[in-house]
Amino acid sequence: MEELKLQQKEIVETRQGEAFAPFTKDENVYTKKFYIESYGCQMNFSDSEIVASILNKEGFGATRNCEEADLIFVNTCSIREKAEQTVRKRLTEFRKIKESRPGILVGVLGCMAERLKSKFLEEEKLVDIVVGPDAYRALPALVQEAETGQKAVNVMLSRDETYADISPVRLNSNGVSAFISIMRGCNNMCSFCVVPFTRGRERSRNPLSIVAEARDLFDRGFKEVTLLGQNVDSFYFLDEEKSETITFAKLLEMVAQVHPDLRVRFSTSHPKDITEDVLHTIAKYENICSYIHLPVQSGSTRILQLMNRNYTREWYMAKIAQIKKIIPDCGISSDMITGFCTETEQDHQDTLSIMRFSEYDYAYMFYYSERPGTLAARRHTDDVPLEIKKRRLQEVVDMQYQLSLNSNLKDVGKTFKVLIEGESKKSENDWMARNSQNKVIVFPKGEHGFQKGDYVTVKVKECNKATLLGVVV
Ligand code: SAM
Ligand code: SF4
């Protein structure tokens, strides 16, 4: 089981708990310091950048050292029980800092704050501030309130908050790629999922502000943006003045037109909503990356129905076939959940076979964790024993390793245009880059004088299951 934990960690949790600070920081501007740690999905990491922007305006500068912070924030995730346990453990560690420096304030942000609301203050005695994902504009007032010794809570969800006018402070950025939040919330109600309860109703951000953010990033030297939403395909914005509807396909095109050297990625697509238009738009623009994250969750139609995913096994397979037809070189990744309520061995085999059919390049894999208040918790019984969930997860992980390796082996001998993201973690003599399909390619720097943010053509010489190794051509 230890091995399984390691694998899961390698696959899904490389950034969890990352402490944030901008890559440049002016010590003189700020009189007070905040420390922020983020857990969960990319949307949370992106929200932390909005929080940083709001706090900067209030005179707080970011630090990566919690020992010197006046304000400590944890941006939390509720998606699985384990994510919540990690946050609780971390909060007890912050208790020690607070005991030695009683003046500091500790705040809980994000999904767990929204789920537990003021219960947090009773359960976790050291927490001073509790703020849900739609209430970050209230942070300065809440901090002031907490400074007077009161507990400060705002967990109001909104139908229209998109933080469109707030320019995020890029935290821990490599200066090459950045995330742009294009919508918030989710209307889907997948039965296992807590997100609709913690992040509220779906709303799309004004496309002009999205394009302006992309242009500003490009002007500042960024070369890649990832458009973020829980279900990007349901992006919908009505420009009342022009009586024009902006769909996700249109938005993709608008961002792609900012500059041919700005790569565009997006996440996450829902199999029931991704349109042919989106696929043709990806195929049409070289700078829209040939990569789609299309979570299947399960390969069994019966389980998909219980999950309320609104597609069947056959529908999903037809989507994969359509993607491969319209974008032949497309990279595809997925999410899988093992051991959902009533899952049989046959259902599990159906998941393994749909993985084989789809030939995923990469996947995020989980065993089912019942979340209080969700449709599944109310309607179905969490009846698959933990050891079976974990055994099936291991089989899914093993299958994915094989698929990733096969996929990488097929790339040996091919040539790709890659974007250099920075130095390889393993050697200062190598660059780490990504191709359009989102695969990592490592290659020797040599005497070429390339820099981070450059596009380079690289030929793949060898590979392992996680990385392609190449040379400049
Ligand atoms: N909106 C995206 C989607 O629909 O694919 C992502 C949602 S969630 C942040 C990321 C993944 O977490 C899901 O795709 C699902 O595989 C997994 N997940 C969500 N709820 C879960 C639960 N209760 N137990 C285990 N995994 C879960
Ligand atoms: Fe959760 Fe489903 Fe919405 Fe994704 S689409 S956030 S899994 S409810």
Image (cartoon, rainbow, N blue to C red):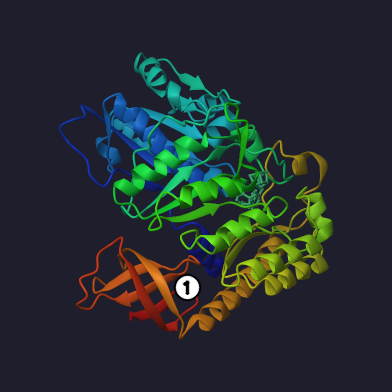
Q: Does residue 91 appear in this view?
A: no
The secondary element bearing badge 1 is classed as: loop
Which of the 4 image quarters holds residue 376? top right
Q: Is residue 457 above or below residue 10?
A: below
Q: Is residue 155 left or right of residue 414?
A: right
The location of residue 409, given as percent across then percent down, is 52, 83
Question: Pointer 1: residues within 10 angstroms few (<14), some, or many (20+)?
Answer: some
In the image as oriented, which residue stretches furthest toward the left? 28
Q: Is residue 312 above or below residue 124?
A: below
Q: Does residue 20 appear in this view?
A: yes
The location of residue 252, given as percent across then percent down, is 53, 50
Q: Residue type at mark 1: give it.
A: Ala
Q: Residue at x 47, y 30 (%)?
A: 163
**Quadrant of the rendering where the C terminus is positioned:** bottom left
Q: Is mark 1 within 8 Å of ligand 1?
A: no
**Quadrant of the rendering where the N terminus is positioned:** bottom right
The location of residue 189, given as percent across then percent down, is 72, 41
Which of the 4 image quarters holds residue 57? top left
Q: Residue at x 22, y 75 (%)?
A: 448
Nearest the viewer among 288 and 60 is 288
Nearest the viewer among 4 and 162 is 162
Q: Is residue 364 above or below residue 152?
A: below
Q: Residue at x 33, y 37 (%)?
A: 35
In the image as oriented, which residue stretches furthest toward the right? 302
Q: Is residue 405 left or right of residue 180?
A: right
Q: Residue at x 78, y 68 (%)?
A: 350
Q: Is residue 188 above or below residue 285?
A: above
Please give the count of numbered marks on the rendered protein. 1
The location of residue 428, given as percent across then percent down, is 24, 70
Give the residue number, with chain letter if any, for mark 1.
Answer: 466
